[in-house]
Image (cartoon, rainbow, N blue to C red):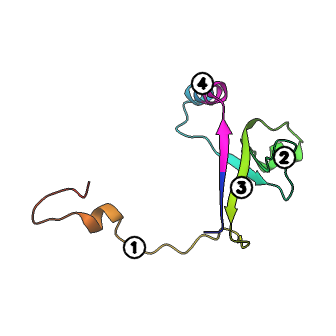
Amino acid sequence: MAALAEVYLKKETLQIILNALEAKKENGFAMTISIDDDSNQYGQNVSAFASQSKEQREAKKQKFYVGNGKVFWHNEKISLGVKQESKELPTPAQENFDTLSGELPF
């Protein structure tokens, strides 16, 4: 693990997001997390906002900020996320399921 951060979202902001999801009949919400090198006057260096498409960014559409917070641990090495090639691996639920007794792992 390279870093741990916390982000605080207000109840009102969560309700706005839920209302928008229901209106658009969507199942989820993508957000972008930004981590700055310097902290603001409140000791925060993390902000979260609704993800934007390339077209929205190019049109300089205003960001919808959903929360902010701070990094509280890091190991000084953060790498970019790279998608690994898909391999057919059993899910953890499949690995832990005891087929002889029929018991679930939880």
In the rendered image, residue 94, in percent from the top left (x then y), is placed at 28, 64
* Residue neighbourhood size for the residue with mark 1, other residues' Cα within 10 Å, grouped as few (<14), some (14–19), many (≥20): few
The mark that comes first in sequence, 3 or 4, is 4
- Name the residue tied to disc 1: 88
Q: Name the secondary structure under disc 2.
A: helix
Tell me the residue that label 3 is attached to: 71
Q: Is the residue marked by circle 2 packed among few (<14), some (14-19), or many (20+) residues within 10 Å? A: few
**Mark in front: 4 vs 1:** 4
Q: Which residue is mark 4?
A: 19
Q: At label 1, which amino acid type do we have?
A: Glu
Nearer the viewer's eye, disc 2 or disc 3?
Answer: 3
Q: Quadrant of residue 11?
A: top right
Q: Which residue is mark 2?
A: 57
Contact, CB < 8 Å: mark 2 with mark 3? no
Q: Amino acid at mark 4?
A: Asn
Residue drawn at x 39%, y 73% is 88
Q: Magenta segment: does it hold 9?
A: yes
Mark 2–mark 3 distance (CA, rounded to whole Å): 25 Å
Q: Nearer the viewer, mark 1 or mark 3?
A: 3
Q: Vertically, is 98 above or below 59? A: below
Indicate the quadrant containing the C terminus: top left, top right, bottom left or bottom right. Answer: bottom left
Earlier in the chain: of badge 4 and badge 2, it is 4
Whole-number angstrom distance, CA of label 1 to CA of label 3:
35 Å
